[in-house]
Image: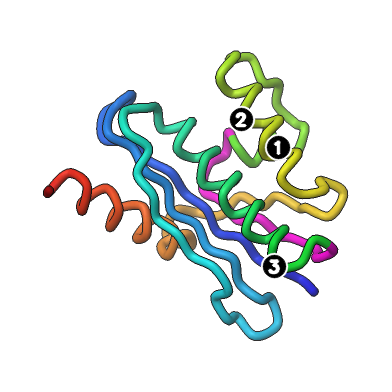
Amino acid sequence: MKLIIEADGGSRGNPGPAAYGCLVKDAQTNEVLFEEGKTLGITTNNVAEYSGLVAALEAAHEIDPNAQIEVRMDSKLVVEQMSGNWKIKHVNMKGLVEKARKAFSQAQVKYVWVPREDNLAADTLLNIALDAELNQ
C-alpha cells in the first residue's frame, strides 16, 4: 500500500497559540483514511509543524506499518531536516525529529516539499482547530 501524508502546523505569534492539521490518504484512491486538527497550546510554528508530521506518521503506521509513505509539507525546514539535508541545531527540534523517525520506518518514507497552496487540506484542519480553541 502507498499512503500520502499531508501535514501542516502553525502558530499565531511565534511562539503563540498553535495547532497542527494532518491527513493520511490512500495514494491510489485518494480516499482520506485519517484526518486530525489539534491545538497545542502556546508553542512555536516549528514545533507545530513537527507535531503534525508525528501525528500523521503514527496514524499511517496504524493503517499499514508496511506502507510506502510520501509526506507532503510546505515546511522547507521539516522536509530538509527529515530528508537529512539540513542539520538539526535546536534542542527542541532534535527530540521532535527523533519522535518522527521512530513513528514510522524512515526507509519507507519520502519527504516532498510542496507550495502552501498545495497543502490547503492540512492548513484548513489546523485553522479550524485553532479558531475553535481561540473562540471559546
Question: Image point 67% across, 34% down: which residue?
Answer: 99
* Image coords of residue 93 (percent x, y): 59, 23
Label 1 or label 2, whichever lies nearer to me, is 2
Q: Which residue is mark 2?
A: 96
Question: Image point 58% across, 74% down: which residue?
Answer: 33
* Residue 68, image quadrant: bottom right
Label 3 or label 2, whichever lies nearer to me, is 3
Q: Which mark is residue 33?
A: none
Alpha carbon distance from label 1 to label 2: 10 Å
Q: Please determine whether, in this image, residue 117 is positioned above or below residue 52.
A: below
Asked if residue 75 is among those painted magenta in the image, a careful observer would answer yes
Q: Which residues are magenta?
A: 66-77
* Residue 5, image quadrant: bottom right
* Image coords of residue 23 (percent x, y): 53, 63
Q: Which residue is mark 1?
A: 82
Q: Which residue is mark 3?
A: 63
Q: Secondary structure at mark 3?
A: helix
